[in-house]
Image (cartoon, rainbow, N blue to C red):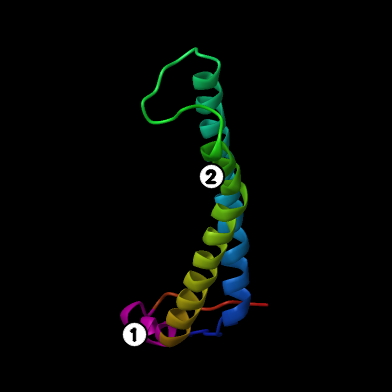
Amino acid sequence: MKVRQKIEILSLAKLQALLLSLVGLVFGILYSIGGLLLDTLVSIGWITSTTTTGLGLGSILALGALIGVPVLFGIIGFLLGLAEAVLYNLFSGYLGYFFPKMKIGLKK
């Protein structure tokens, strides 16, 4: 017996956007803390660097990663969620031919 129900495309897209936004927030926090720490250590003279002069515009851009990375990851997650749901809805009916004993579907 083959059970198949379709995935709501926008529901999965919104879920993927939320999940990847949270991942992006974690990455944004790590990036901004790392950049701020490096710039601070250069500014107080504990380390030397040829790539950064210390606290300045780069530090502000690193803090901008707190907003930019989650937004970018959210957009990517939304687009991937759309693609995943469309592909599942298109091909889930055909999987029963290749795996006849596998139940495919979602139950409410």
Q: Nearer the viewer, mark 1 or mark 2?
A: 2
Answer yes or no: is residue 78 visible. Answer: yes
Q: Position of residue 11 (x, y in %)?
A: 63, 76
Give above or below for 91 relative to 35.
below
From this viewpoint, which residue is outermost toward the right?
108
Q: Tell me the element at label 1.
A: helix
Q: Earlier in the sequence, mark 1 or mark 2?
A: 2
Q: Quadrant of residue 29?
A: top right
Q: Residue at x 52, y 85 (%)?
A: 4
Q: Residue at x 63, y 62 (%)?
A: 18
Callout 2: SS: helix
The chief SS type of the magenta part is: helix
* Dot label at residue 27: 2
Residue underneath mark 1:
97
Disc tally is 2
Q: Position of residue 51 (x, y in %)?
A: 38, 31
Q: Mark 1 and mark 2: span between their CA atoms?
A: 41 Å
Q: Magenta region: which residues?
A: 91-100
The amino acid on which the numbered mark 2 sits, given as a three-letter code, is Phe
Q: Where's residue 24, x and y in %?
A: 55, 51
Q: Residue at x 62, y 71 (%)?
A: 14
Examine the rendered structure and indicate whether residue 75 appears above or below residue 82.
above
Amino acid type, label 1: Tyr
Q: Residues within 10 Å of mark 1 (few under 14, many from 20)?
A: few
Q: Viewed as shown, does residue 94 lie left or right of 73?
A: left
